[in-house]
């Protein structure tokens, strides 16, 4: 048993054995983000530290505030959930990046998935697209070959065959991640194929919040998802560990004519799709587990009221926070995400942070990056999550992206391009990925 104080960690400022142990033990942790960045940046170890020009300045470090000494008792008797890893969803950035020339694509894949010099992301969430009907949603599908959010589907018509040549760009990134060591794969859906929907539009129903999957296609939707999962295993050697049929389906965000796929489900409809999908996985002899329901914390708390929820083997939660409160507001992380932890324990399920990012967060690059560092620390600790997956590893907005690279090259561009480079947010996040490795078991501290 070891006792470590916060003040001793700050004074150490090196990534020594005690600090590494403390960071893992505290589960990422009740240590101020500034201090953890400095510790990681100045450390050695097996993974590369950031170059000096990407470290916080002395002026920035002078703003660090510590609230005295906190004694932390480390004991192996307090063992947390096995850590599954760090990851990213591929929608929508892979629909652009996967079409870049080989050199630029390879550089970005190395930065995100290579475990030594890159972030070493080992979890990949692949989006099974719904495709589109060109007569619908002209804003969304001005040019489906270059629009990132226009994710191709594999069955463009009800009566036609599956098109396994579709979605090549996203598949390029998936397979490239696998080659670099990614080993946990999840398939998820934002919307059923357009021809299964009420509106004929994968962006949602005609009226915001209405359900959009036709009841007579609930079984067909489950068959579509599981057919894609089965085909990826046989055709490309990718075995999806889990399948998620929903995305923010309880939030009632979605309506036709908007800029990306989405589909509302009411709890009874969701329960039927869960049952159909579970049965389809069993019928096809797939080892893929069914998970859900990829909603925000408030709606995830409704999960015990969803029929057939016991068929879900894990709870996926979206950990966006800043729409509800600022860092100084009275509403706490504990109030929001503690409910998820308690729900998961009630149902006997693990929790993943399956989506997170600086949604609507303003401020400087450092402000946003440190905000996201806090998001990791708070959500993983409070929910006792076993994985953390960000929504976009590369994006138009610099606040979301780990890589600096101009996003305005068309997919067929073959001229000279700038070299993709790691940015400051990359190095902040790498601090977490290099210290908490998949398979480790964080020890819960006693304060």
Image (spheres, rainbow, N blue to C red):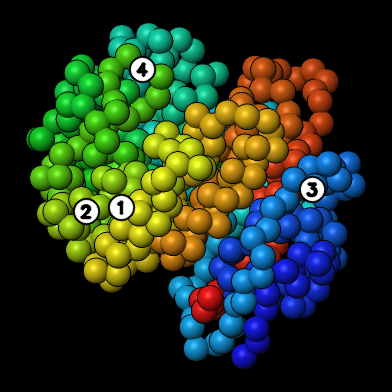
Q: Are marks 4 and 3 in contact (CB under 8 Å)?
A: no
Q: How many marks?
A: 4
> Which residue is at 62% across, 37% downward?
368
Viewer-nearest of discs 4 and 2: 2
Residue 61 tag number: 3
Mark 4 or mark 1: whose residue is earlier in sequence: 4
The residue at which mark 1 appears reads as 292
**Mark closer to the chain start, 1 or 3:** 3
Q: Relative to 306, is 53 on the left or the right? A: right
Callout 2: few (<14), some (14-19), or many (20+) C-alpha neighbours within 10 Å? many
Q: Is the Cβ of the residue at disc 4 closer than 8 Å to that at disc 2?
A: no
Asked if labels 1 and 4 touch by Cβ distance under 8 angstroms, the answer is: no
Q: Position of residue 68 (x, y in %)?
A: 67, 65
Mark 2 highlights which residue? 303
Above or below, 132 against 385 in this view is above
The residue beneath circle 4 is 258
In this view, 362 is above or below 18: above
Give the mark toward the camera: 4 or 3. 3
**Which badge, 4 or 2, comes first in the chain's sequence?**
4
> Which is more foreground, mark 1 or mark 3?
3
Residue at disc 1, secondary structure: strand
* SS at badge 2: helix
Q: CA distance from mark 4 to mark 3?
A: 42 Å
Residue 131, which numbered label?
A: none
- Contact between marks 1 and 2 (CB within 8 A): the answer is yes
Relative vertical location of residue 434 with respect to residue 393 in this rendering, above or below: below
- The Cα–Cα distance between marks 4 and 2, rounded to whole angstroms, is 27 Å
Please rate how many residues cluster around mark 4, counting C-alpha atoms within 10 Å: few if below 14, some from 14 to 19, many from 20.
some
Foreground: 25 or 430?
25
Q: Earlier in the sequence, mark 4 or mark 3?
A: 3
Task: Look at the image and tell me in which quarter the N terminus lies.
Answer: bottom right
């Amino acid at each position: 048993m070891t006792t470590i104080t916060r003040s001793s960690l700050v004074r150490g400022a090196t990534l020594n054995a005690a600090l590494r142990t403390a960071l893992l033990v505290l589960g990422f942790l009740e240590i101020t983000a500034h201090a953890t960045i400095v510790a990681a940046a100045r450390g050695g170890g097996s993974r590369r530290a950031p170059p000096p020009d990407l470290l916080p300045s002395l002026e920035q470090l002078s703003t660090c505030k510590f609230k005295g000494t906190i004694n932390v008792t480390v004991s192996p008797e307090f063992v947390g959930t096995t850590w599954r890893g760090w990851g990213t969803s591929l929608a929508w950035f892979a629909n652009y990046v996967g079409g870049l020339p080989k050199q630029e694509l390879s550089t970005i894949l190395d930065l995100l998935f290579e475990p030594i010099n890159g972030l070493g992301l080992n979890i990949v969430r692949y989006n099974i697209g719904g495709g589109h009907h060109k007569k619908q949603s002209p804003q969304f599908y001005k040019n489906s070959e270059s629009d990132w959010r226009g994710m191709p589907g594999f069955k463009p018509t009800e009566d036609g065959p599956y098109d396994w040549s579709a979605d090549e760009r996203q598949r390029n990134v998936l397979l490239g991640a696998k080659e670099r060591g990614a080993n946990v794969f999840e398939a998820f859906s934002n919307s059923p194929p357009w021809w299964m929907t009420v509106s004929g539009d994968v962006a949602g129903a005609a009226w915001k919040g209405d359900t959009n999957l036709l009841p007579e296609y609930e079984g067909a939707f489950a068959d579509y998802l599981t057919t894609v999962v089965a085909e990826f295993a046989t055709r490309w050697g990718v075995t999806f560990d889990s399948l998620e049929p929903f995305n923010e389906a309880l939030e009632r965000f979605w309506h036709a004519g908007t800029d990306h796929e989405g589909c509302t489900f009411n709890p009874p409809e969701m329960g039927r799709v869960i049952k159909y999908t579970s049965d389809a996985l069993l019928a096809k002899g797939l080892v893929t587990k069914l998970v859900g329901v990829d909603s925000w914390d408030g709606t995830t708390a409704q999960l015990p009221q969803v029929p057939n929820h016991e068929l879900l083997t894990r709870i996926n939660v979206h950990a966006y926070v800043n729409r509800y409160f600022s860092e100084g507001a009275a509403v706490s992380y504990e109030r929001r995400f503690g409910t998820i932890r308690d729900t998961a324990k009630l149902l006997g399920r693990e929790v993943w942070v399956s989506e997170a990012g600086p949604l609507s967060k303003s401020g400087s690059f450092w402000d946003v990056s440190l905000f996201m560092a806090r998001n990791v620390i708070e959500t993983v600790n409070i929910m006792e999550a076993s994985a953390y997956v960000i929504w976009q590893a590369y994006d138009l907005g610099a606040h979301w992206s780990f890589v600096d690279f101009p996003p305005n090259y068309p997919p067929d561009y073959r001229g000279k391009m700038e070299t993709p480079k790691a940015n400051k947010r990359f190095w902040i996040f790498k601090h977490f990925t290099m210290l908490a490795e998949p398979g480790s078991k964080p020890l819960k501290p006693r304060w």
